[in-house]
Amino acid sequence: MAVSDEKTRTLITILKTDKEKLEDIAAKENRSFNQQVNHILQQFLKDQSAN
């Protein structure tokens, strides 16, 4: 699948248990795992820029 010019692919390593928790949260919020991780990162970055 192609990635738009404004995005980049990255590879991260996380605990299996953390991935499972994120997948559960994503399902409850009707997001994919990838969308959920992006959402969390965007919220974190927004909070950091507010400080």
Image (cartoon, rainbow, N blue to C red):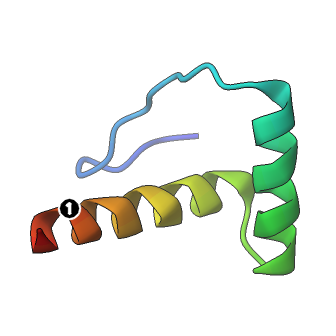
Which residue is nearer to you in this view: 22 or 11?
22
Above or below, 11 against 25 in this view is above
In the image, taking residue 38 as reference, residue 6 lies left or right, namely left
Residue 27, horizontal then vertical, whole percent: 86, 70
Residue 46, horizontal then vertical, whole percent: 25, 70
Q: What residue type is labelled 1?
A: Gln
Above or below, 25 against 6 in this view is below
Which residue shows up at 26% across the image and 60% down it? 45
Which residue shows up at 72% across the image and 54% down it? 33
Above or below, 46 against 15 in this view is below
In the image, taking residue 37 as reference, residue 42 lies left or right, namely left
Which residue is nearer to you in this view: 7 or 33?
33
Which residue shows up at 57% across the image and 53% down it? 37
- Location of residue 17 by image quarter: top right
Q: Total label count?
A: 1
Which quadrant, please, contains the N terminus?
top right
Q: Residue furthest front?
A: 51
Secondary structure state at the residue bearing disc 1 = helix
Residue 2, horizontal then vertical, whole percent: 48, 41
Q: Mark 1 points at which residue?
A: 48
Above or below, 8 against 38 in this view is above
- Mark 1 neighbour class, 10 Å CA radius: few under 14, some 14 to 19, many 20 or more: few
Which residue shows up at 62% across the image and 19% down it? 13
Which quadrant, please, contains the C terminus?
bottom left
- Location of residue 31 by image quarter: bottom right
Which residue is nearer to you in this view: 4 or 34?
34
